[in-house]
Image (cartoon, grey):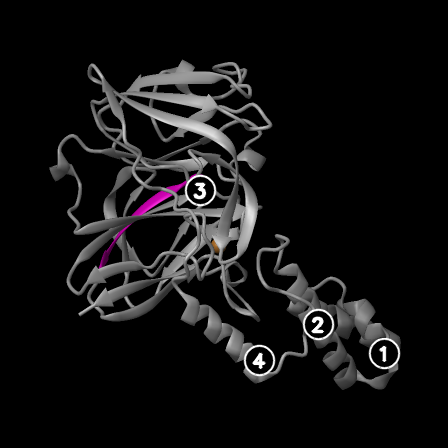
Amino acid sequence: MGLITSKINRRRLAGVLGIAGVGAAASAVAPAGFGVAYSDAAKAAANAAATASDPHAGMAAQSSDQAMSVDEMDKMHEAGVKAFPAKTAGLGGQPLPFELDGDVKVFKLSCGVIQWEYSPGKTAEAFAYNGVVPGPEIRVTEGDKVRVIVDNIDLPQSTAVHFHGLVLPNAMDGVPFMTQPPIKPGETFTYEFPIREGNAGSHMYHSHHNSAEQVSKGMLGPFIIEPKDPARRPTFDKEYTLILNDGPIGGFTINGKGFPATAPLTAKKGERILVRYMNEGQMIHPMHLHGMPQTVIAQDGYLLPQPYKADTVAADPGQRIDVLVDATEPGVWAYHCHILSHAESQHGMFGMVTALIVEE
Ligand SMILES: [Cu+2]
């Protein structure tokens, strides 16, 4: 009877804590009663949780020093916030210039391997377009004719580029063996297509070959289509694109960087900003802005029939969500993914954290 009770308690505890291995840890001290078992089990669970919350090696500063004092922990949290926004080498997502060939806008993307600094002093091997993560921003207008020349300069793999969200001819869809041969190392491929009316909005381009590795490692970028008639979109004073990713380069990142190397968003009081979330990762990322609501106006580039307000806006993998924020409240407002293990550890905030700074 006693044994059964103790088993149930351990199981219930494991269920509450969401940890599978708690029973074994508790059984080492089983006869001593629930209080002791709880204390030991809780410690074991805390240890397991600390380890489990760091799925990407080298991503966050989770380690085995569980005996951190209150002041030690606070100091690490403070240091992270004080370092924000921290300088790192490399800045992705900047506008890509084009050349005109007649009336065709010609963009060039090169593919290669780089070392990418995702957080101060921390680098990882990345597969990049034009040497940056995210790749540079391609921005065109409905009705444009577009050519994108992709040069696989020195990837150790073939690749192909898919223009995610664009309505284009099948042969330009960028799926090896389905619509085109793979672009082998040393080869180029030219994509050319018109930008259709009705396709305005926040889109993306990314690898569609060995994509779980190539996109995770940086082969992604924003593809923004302006409406031919700007009156068809809500107005705003400035805009930001936040590309979310999770994977081998820095774990949880916004625009290729993890906190404190993420860039803050800024606005003067009274300004309205547009934020384009683009989820290039493999997990959902509910982005929570403190202080002011977000008005969701578009999904995958398409304007919603009825915008709505929310304080936490999730983007599924592959989705783009556009929101407007009226910067009504001055101050430095935390802005982060609300899957907390994507944003904070016992060593402080990291990963998908930035801030909206509203100036008076
Ligand atoms: Cu997240």
Can residue 320 be found in the magenta stretch? yes
Q: Residue 133, can we see it?
A: yes
Is residue 1 at all visible to an observer of this figure?
no
Q: CA distance from mark 4 to mark 1?
A: 33 Å
Cα distance between the residues tagged 4 and 2 = 29 Å
Position of 141 with respect to 338 (left or right) is left
Q: Position of residue 162 (x, y in %)?
A: 43, 26
Instruction: State whether label 1 is within 8 Å of ligand 1.
Output: no
The label shown at residue 283 is none
In the rendering, which numbered label is found on residue 72?
4
Left or right: 208 with respect to 298?
A: right
How would you rate the neighbour count of disc 2 (Cα within 10 Å): few for under 14, some for 14-19, many for 20 or more?
many
Q: Secondary structure at mark 4?
A: helix
Which residues fall within the magenta stretch?
317-326
Label 4 vs label 2, nearer the camera: 4
User: Is 78 one of the magenta-colored residues?
Assistant: no
Position of residue 298 measured from the top left corner of the image (x, y, whole percent): 28, 43
Hey, what amino acid is under mark 3? Answer: Val
Instruction: Check disc 1 and report its element: helix, strand or loop.
Output: helix
Which quadrant: the N terminus? bottom right
Above or below for 310 versus 64: above
* Left or right placement of residue 342 versus residue 164 in this view: right
- Give the CA separation, mark 4 to mark 3: 33 Å
Looking at the rendered structure, the secondary structure element under dot 3 is: loop
Q: Earlier in the sequence, mark 4 or mark 1?
A: 1
Amino acid carrying mark 1 in the image: Ala
Q: Which residue is mark 1?
A: 30
Residue placed under numbered mark 3 in the picture: 133
Foreground pick, 310 / 248: 248
- Counting residues from the start of the chain, the first of labels 1 and 3 encountered is 1
Mark in front: 4 vs 1 = 4
